[in-house]
Image (cartoon, rainbow, N blue to C red):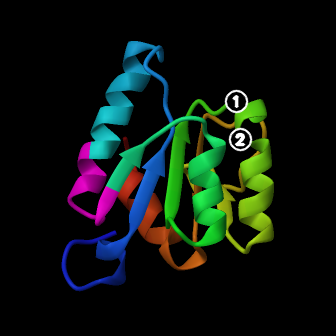
Amino acid sequence: MHVGTHPQRAAIVETSQVGDEPAPVQARIGAAIGALMSRALLVRTTIPTTFPMLAVAAGRSDAFWQYAPALTGVAAGLLLVTEAGGVATDLAGAPWRPGAPDLLVTTPALHGAALDALAGL
C-alpha cells in the first residue's frame, strides 16, 4: 500500500488484537498500525476477530491482519473470506494454515501491497 494516487491509499485495513498480548506482540501491533496509517485511508482495530473478516468478505473492508491468531477465532471468517474470493496467507505470503504465527486476509488486488506494508514488522 502506497501513499499517493494508488488505489491502496483508499484501503480500509483492520486488525483484531486484545490488550493482554505479550509485550513483543503489542510492540508489533503498534509498529504495524503506524506503518499502515501512512499507506491506507483507515486503520482500525476491533474485536471479535470474525467481524472485520466478515467486512473483508462483504467488500466493506480491504484487508485484515492478526498476530498470533487462534484457530477458533479465525476459522469462520477465513471460510467466508476465501469463499468470497479473498486471499488468506501468513505474513510471509505462504497459504495460511492452523498454527501459523500470523494471518493476512485481503482482496486479491491488495494482497502484495499489504504484504509489503507489513514486511519485517
| Disc 1 element | loop
Q: Residues within 10 Å of mark 1 (few under 14, many from 20)?
A: some
Residue 37 is one of the magenta-drawn residues = yes
Taking 7 as reference, is 72 above or below it?
above
Q: Which residue is mark 2?
A: 74
Marks 1 and 2 close (CB-CB < 8 Å): yes
Does dot 2 land on a helix, a strand or a loop?
Answer: helix
* Boundaries of the magenta span: 34-42
> What is the quadrant of residue 4 in the picture?
bottom left
Looking at the picture, which amino acid does disc 1 mark? Ala
Residue 48 locus on image (x, y percent):
60, 35
- Judging by the rendered image, the residue that carries numbered circle 1 is 70
Label 2 Cα neighbours within 10 Å, binned few <14 / some 14-19 / many ≥20: some
> In the image, is residue 52 part of the stretch drawn in magenta?
no
Query: Residue shown at 74%/72% (left/top)?
Result: 84
Alpha carbon distance from label 1 to label 2:
6 Å
